[in-house]
Image (tube, rainbow, N blue to C red):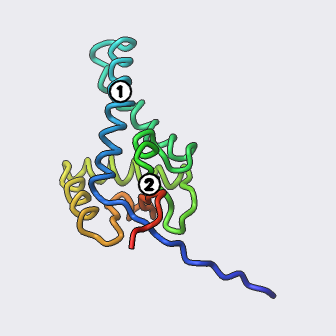
Amino acid sequence: METETLQPIEMNPVGFWRRLGANLLDGLIIGVPLALLSYLISPADENEWFTNALSAVYSLLLPVLWFGYTVGKKLLGIRIVKMDGSQVGIGTMLLRVFVGMYLVYGITLGIGAIVSAIMVAAREDKRSIHDLIAGTYVTSNKPPQG
């Protein structure tokens, strides 16, 4: 019986500023048009709910369908991958987005998000709380320097 040996995947984790930049680009390129669209097509008392729902669907599905990219991440040459370097699936993104970002950050009233930002800045592997929950990290398409 022949066994296959796995070659270690070289991690090229992305730090705080590029991740923040990608989120800001997503907000400008996707979030602002979504908010405007929501304002135009839904009643005023439902705007926030509609915008949040569309934003959640975007954050959940686009990385699954587009190999770990969102628009902002693609523009900055970074993407979300599983710890073994493989593509994220719907289950992984459900853990990352809904459990990690919405549930944990919501329950902690945003303190979890602040802790995550510090973790990305300080940890060698640049993983945040939602990365740890989902077994993911954000990597650069460019080879590591050094």
Q: Secondary structure at mark 1?
A: helix
Residue 71 in picture, x, y percent from top left: 44, 39
55 to 138, vertically: above or below: above
Q: Residue at x 26, y 59 (%)?
A: 116
Say if 52 sits above or below 35 in the image. Answer: below
Element carrying mark 2: helix
Residue 36 screen position, x and y as percent: 33, 18
In the image, is residue 35 above or below residue 79? above
Q: Quadrant of residue 22?
A: top left
Whole-number angstrom distance, CA of label 2 to CA of label 1: 21 Å
Question: 76 above or below 54?
Answer: below
Q: Which residue is mark 1?
A: 51
Residue at the bottom extreme of this rendering: 1
Tell how many labels: 2
| Residue closest to the eye, 77 or 81 | 77
Q: Which residue is mark 2?
A: 95
Residue in the image at 56% along x and 49% along y = 67
> Toward the viewer: 97 or 30?
30
